[in-house]
Amino acid sequence: MENKEITEFIDRRKLMKFDDEVEEALSSISQIEKIEVDEAYATVRERMQKNMHFHRFLNQVQRVAAILFIPLLIGSLWYMASNKKAEKTFASSIYTTKSPIGMRSILTLPDSSKVWLNSGSTLSYSIPFTKSNRRVAIKGEAYFEVSKIHGSSFFVNSANLEVKVLGTKFNFKAYNDEKRTEVFLDEGKVELYPSKNGEKDIKDKVVIEPGTRAIVDNANGHIITSIENTEKFTAWRKGMMIFDNTSFGEVAKQLERWYGTEIIVRDPVVYKYKITTKFKDETLKDVLEMLEISSPIKIRYKPNVLDPITNQIKIKSKIIIEKK
């Protein structure tokens, strides 16, 4: 071959080789594009599936949250209601104090009124104790010195009687085991309202003056009044017991409350005996000896029996009374 032909042959070979390389390159690019598209599609599909799973999960969470929210809401409402009820209960709570058996107590109320409580007596009042709510309840016996506040009445309640006062001094006796309630007015003026079935009867109101003793029949609310000696009904505040022609039955009750003992009368005739005497800060033994000397009675005293381990009273003391 001539040089020219050889040169042309070589050029054609190079061109064919180049075409093959280009075709191979294009094929590779096509495959790469296909691979990238497939991968991209797979990636997008995977993400979509993940999103679908996420949305399904989110929907389930929302459903569960909705289900849980209902009892949570109910619980919250109940808690709020309970708190309001507790606040209301606290706002209207009752304060109660009791004088121990064999002792007398004195206390000052929030309005500066003073109250003396006899042995075993209980006083209660609601808190807050304000100008518009000066009301107390008594079980037992108490002496009141009520502070006078303009435009504010003071009330004392028992199971069978309500006493309305402004500023005064009086003795109130209301034991649950007795058939009558007593009020003795020392100073000032009070209004008495017998209670029937827990409600006061306004039409049966009785107003008493100083030195007056009012006795209320607990069964029918009937009130009788009499003029009495002040000291007889108020001396207990000073540790004194005064009996003025008092039946032995009444004396026995007072001794039981005063000393925390039990009195057993074997002969009913003894209840009819009348006692006139005074005791001041005497021991139970001294009182019994004086009664036995001054009355036709015979007394046997059985003291308290203490528990040897706790040293607490196991058997309460007893007083057995018989006629001589």
Image (cartoon, rainbow, N blue to C red):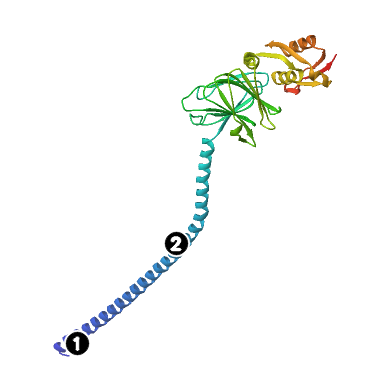
User: Please, what is the three-letter code of the amino acid marked with disc 1?
Assistant: Phe
Tell which of 276 and 59 is nearer to you.
Answer: 276
- Residue 204's spot in the image, x, y percent? 61, 31
- Residue 247's spot in the image, x, y percent? 75, 18
- Residue 304 appearing in the image: no
Q: Quadrant of residue 193?
A: top right
Q: Residue furthest left?
A: 4
Q: Which residue is mark 1?
A: 9
Q: Residue furthest bottom?
A: 1
Q: Residue furthest front?
A: 203
- Residue 85's spot in the image, x, y percent? 53, 42
The residue located at (53%, 44%) in the rendering is 82
- Residue 219 vertical position relative to residue 267 in the rendered view, above or below: below
Tell which of 4 and 48 is nearer to you.
Answer: 48
Q: Which residue is mark 2?
A: 58
Q: Residue furthest right?
A: 324
Query: Of marks 2 and 1, which one's residue comes earlier in the chain?
Result: 1
Q: Which mark is residue 301?
A: none
**The C terminus sits in image quarter:** top right
- Residue 279 appearing in the image: yes
- Residue 21's spot in the image, x, y percent? 26, 79
User: Please, what is the three-letter code of the amino acid marked with disc 2?
Assistant: Leu
The residue located at (36%, 72%) in the rendering is 41
Task: State the CA–CA distance, disc 2 to disc 1.
Answer: 72 Å
